[in-house]
Amino acid sequence: MDINYTEKVREIFSRREAPPLCCVHSYGCQQNVNDGERLTGMLCSMGCGVTDDMTCADVIILNTCAVRENAELKVYGNIGELKRLKEQKPHMVIGVCGCMAQEEKTAEKIKKSYRHVDMVFGTFATAELPRLLYEVLTERKFVADTAERENECPEGLPMVRSCSYKAGVAVMYGCNNFCSYCIVPYVKGRERSRKPENIIEEVKELVNNGCREIMLLGQNVNSYGKGLDEKINFPELLRRIDSIDGDFRIRFMSPHPKDATKELFDVMAESKKICRTIHLPLQSGSDRILREMNRQYTAEKYMDIVSYARKKMPGLSITTDIIVGFPNETYEDFTCTLDIMRAVKYDNIFSFIYSPRTGTKAAEIADMTPAEDKSRWFRELLAVQREISDEHYKRFMGRELTVLFDSVYKEEFISGKSDEFIITLVKGDPSLIGSMRKVRVTKTHNWAVEGEIIG
Ligand code: SF4
């Protein structure tokens, strides 16, 4: 017989004078933030209230990211800082979960060196939170669950969204690509897709509740559909979401260039709801380095994709990720990356100097490229992108953009993103946050545009 641990924990919490408060802190990508919203939802269904302030919390969950090794050090620093809080509040429950926690060595290290932590659970064990919490509350012992589970696609778990007007919707989990520098396939497992009807249901509910922007999420979002009984691919999923009634826009993150088919761009071009923007991670413009990275495309193939996309949608905004200084990269390799940047004219790049990630193939390569060279190339890359953006953002001058406002910028402005994913600043009332407005651009920078609301 299945034990209802949610009810059991709720019963324990109900005996307290006041409902306990939970604080879930998510590091890293939007998919992690989405997982964090699910963890908060589960804690609320067990009787917790929510707080952003860890000092007030009775249950703290650190939902970690393992993509960059430096980020892991920061997480360990944050875990260490919680020791003092736990001493002041011994009844507090501290959990560490997410990608970092999926690595078995993390659970061992935490159990040994961070004895104030009560539970560690990996990416496959999200749905196990009620059981783990029950075990901690009743037995006051350290619990860990880092087991990999087959075809784990959590459905029906409650969620507490952090924002009412834009929301992430996970469509698939995991990755099969094994890029040589990336730890994700090892900590998130193989690709598995949610059933389309479950995704459609979630989107409809969000839209009915007033959500204006849906971000479809997946580590490799455009390989959606593998392993499902129904034959469906990502463009077809987009078509179905696009046909849902309502005033909302659709984004998706992150597509892989090797799976960016003509059909994908055809669907985008036909749609009125899918934003005219795509994040197309290049990583390197050198075929030799792309091979070493196991990216499964060449620079020429990448440019063919960009040409087709721009032919279908001439104003398409493109952003990318670039790694500078992959092991044994030469200046000639690096200049191939600059060539593609100049040819594509990215609206924004997210770039890093390569740092080895333990557990990946690339981390085993003996790297002969001097660190000073990598730093110099990185500065050159940023300078080239600044030049491109200076020029490229001018195309927005005088144009009308549709902007969803989401924050205040320097007290004077409200800020939002346009359909093209361009940061747009307007002198306006913060009460407009959460609303979508037409803005006429009156000034351009190399990182944002300014304008005035029209209509
Ligand atoms: S596609 Fe490559 S970089 Fe992206 S998550 Fe998968 S392995 Fe990592």
Image: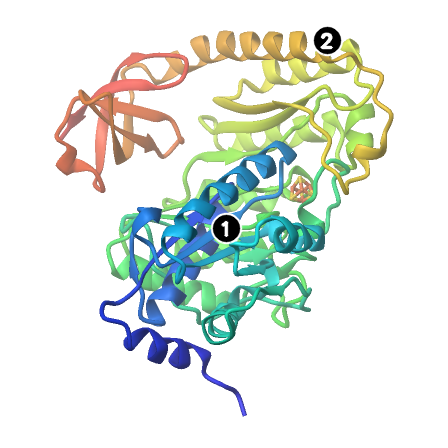
**Horizontal and vertical percent position of residue 72:** 60, 39
**Tag 1 or tag 2, which sits nearer the N-term?**
1
The residue to which callout 1 is attached is 63
Characterize the local packing of mark 2: few (<14), some (14-19) or many (20 or more) Cα atoms within 10 angstroms. Answer: some
| Count of numbered tags | 2
Closest to the observer, 263 or 448: 448
User: What's the residue type where badge 2 is placed?
Assistant: Asp
**Looking at the image, residue 250 lies above or below residue 39:** above
Characterize the local packing of mark 1: few (<14), some (14-19) or many (20 or more) Cα atoms within 10 angstroms. Answer: many
- Left or right: 189 in relation to 36: right
Closest to the observer, 316 or 23: 23
- Left or right: 415 in relation to 120: left
**Looking at the image, residue 411 lies above or below residue 380:** below
User: Does any portion of residue 122 appear in the rendered image?
Assistant: yes
Picture residue at 54% right of the left edge, 47% below the top? 64
**Looking at the image, residue 259 lies above or below residue 160:** above
Quarter residue 342 falls in: top right
- Left or right: 54 in relation to 104: left
Give the SS element for disc 1. strand
Residue furthest bottom as drawn: 1
Residue 260 numbered tag:
none
Please identify, in this view, whether the residue under mark 2 or under mark 1 is nearer the observer: 1
User: What's the residue type where badge 1 is placed?
Assistant: Asn
Q: CA distance from mark 2 to mark 1?
A: 35 Å
Residue furthest right as drawn: 366
Q: Quadrant of the C terminus?
A: top left
The residue to which callout 2 is attached is 373
Quarter residue 125 falls in: bottom right
**Horizontal and vertical percent position of residue 387:** 50, 7
**Horizontal and vertical percent position of residue 384:** 56, 8
Judged from the image, the quadrant occupied by ligand 1 is: top right
Question: CB of mark 2 within 8 Å of CB of mark 1?
Answer: no
